[in-house]
Amino acid sequence: MTTNITINETANYKKRQCNELAEHLRHMGLEKEALSLKNCSSFITYALFEDYKKVSDIRMCQKRYCPICGDMQRSQHSHKMSTIVDTLTRYNSNLITISLELTLRNNSVDHIRKDIKTLKTAWSKIVKCKAIKPNIIGYVYYIHPKYTNQDEYNEMNTHNHMHVIIFFKEVVEEHLKVEYWTEIFKRTANLPYTPYVHLRMLENKEAIITKANYAAKPLEIKHISKKDIKVYLEQIKKQRLITMSQSLNKIYKPLAIKKFTELTSEYKGRVTQYWEQDHYQLTEV
Ligand SMILES: [Zn+2]
């Protein structure tokens, strides 16, 4: 059987990064997390067809900080966004896209989950506002529980914020003012201080995808101090950090199904890619 699979250096590089991070976590005393990274993608079985291949068996850790899984989720997301933007621009000649960054005051690492909840609750209130809801087509938000260890004596080591991409079918002047979003965010998040908000127009598809690709990047955890890493990982456990509005998911779903059902070539066999010391090997199964 001739396989249409080749292993490129990028796959080897990513798995090495993944194993390095596993080693790092082991040194931090996080055996379980280390093991799940070590096992991630160490076996991948593909079903081969005449002109494409499909993964039929894989064990991935699904962690947002995993160099393999985080990167895969990011590229799947960017692809999804690209399809959605194409459809939106086709049907909305006046499409206006805004990028927002909503930031909470620095907090201690054990407050991440609370901060995530504050951000999510505020956002769901914002999109229900009468002055916003009828004007938007959809949105996607990305929560960044960002750890900064500029000062080891400073307990306020997380900088929790969210990036939002909003698609408008129509905007009023207010929607383009940063003061407007600052006020509404302060109110919906019930903050006793004025939060930092950044607003930017995304002029074209390239700008939207660049933003989405940045915002969906894997979580960085290697710089987190030993005293905080365990709490940080506990706090982000099972937290959904990327959320797309139902309206955008509805646009994408039928397109994804269509793409899948169009594939009809002949089945050729299976091949497994496995990790051996420091690189992937292939074997027929
Ligand atoms: Zn993984």
Image (cartoon, rainbow, N blue to C red):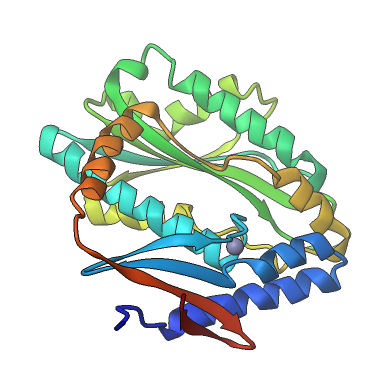
Quadrant for residue 277, please give it: bottom right
The residue closer to the viewer here, 36 or 151, is 36
Q: Tell me if 162 is positioned left or right of 113 in this view.
A: left
Residue 250: percent from left, percent from top: 31, 30
The residue closer to the viewer here, 6 or 13, is 6
Image quarter hosting the N terminus = bottom left
Residue 9: percent from left, percent from top: 44, 85
Indicate whether 72 appears above or below 160.
below
Indicate whether 220 appears above or below 38.
above
Indicate whether 104 appears above or below 203.
above
Residue 77: percent from left, percent from top: 39, 51
Instruction: Kindly identify the residue that appears in the image at 47 percent across and 22 percent down.
Output: 126
Instruction: Kindly identify the residue that appears in the image at 51 percent across and 23 percent down.
Output: 124
Instruction: Kindly identify the residue that appears in the image at 65 percent across and 44 percent down.
Output: 160
Can I make out residue 203 in this image?
no
Quadrant for residue 265, please give it: bottom left
Can I make out residue 165 in this image?
yes
The residue closer to the viewer here, 94 or 60, is 60
Give the image quadrant in which the ligand numbered 1 is located: bottom right
Quadrant for residue 54, please give it: bottom left
Residue 125: percent from left, percent from top: 51, 19
Instruction: Kindly identify the residue that appears in the image at 33 percent across and 39 percent down.
Output: 98
